[in-house]
Image (tube, helix red, strand yellow):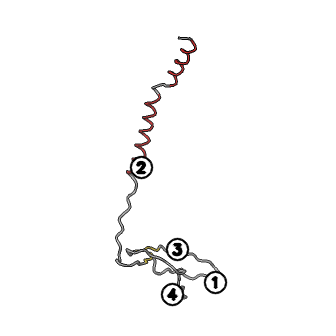
Amino acid sequence: MPKFRRKILKNQKKRNNPKKFPLLFIFGGLAIIIIALLFAFQKKTEPFTPEITGKPSLKTDKEMVDLGNVKLGKTVRVSFELKNVGDETLRISNVPYVEVKEGC
């Protein structure tokens, strides 16, 4: 066998180094285990139990807000949490209406 051919065979043996494959499997296995643990320890959502059946129903976290005395021209911001407590889909087709009463 010529010398040139032997050098090519030696170089091919060095490229196919079997020592690298176990490390690849170890790191791949660790990555799979970490991903599985992330999915296993996720926060579980609680099942939804409707308060009203057969129709949608809107519920707010606050029925009334007292802002005290507010000077004219001063901007006041209030937030509400709205929740559908019915078992049907809630659709709001018009612009929501909020009633502001003076002196209450």
Residue topped by disc 4: 104
For residue 79, the mark is 3
Question: Whole-percent x and y of residue 42?
Answer: 40, 54
Q: Secondary structure at mark 1?
A: loop
* First of labels 1, 4 by sequence position: 1
Separation of marks 1 and 2 at Cα, in angstroms? 53 Å
Amino acid at pointer 3:
Ser
Amino acid at pointer 2:
Leu
* First of labels 4, 2 by sequence position: 2
Residue topped by disc 1: 72
Separation of marks 4 and 3 at Cα, in angstroms? 18 Å
Task: Name the residue: 35% across, 75% down.
Answer: 51
Amino acid at pointer 4:
Cys
Q: Secondary structure at mark 2?
A: helix
Separation of marks 4 and 2 at Cα, in angstroms? 51 Å
For residue 38, the mark is 2
Relative placement, left or right, of 56 versus 65 is left
* First of labels 1, 2 by sequence position: 2
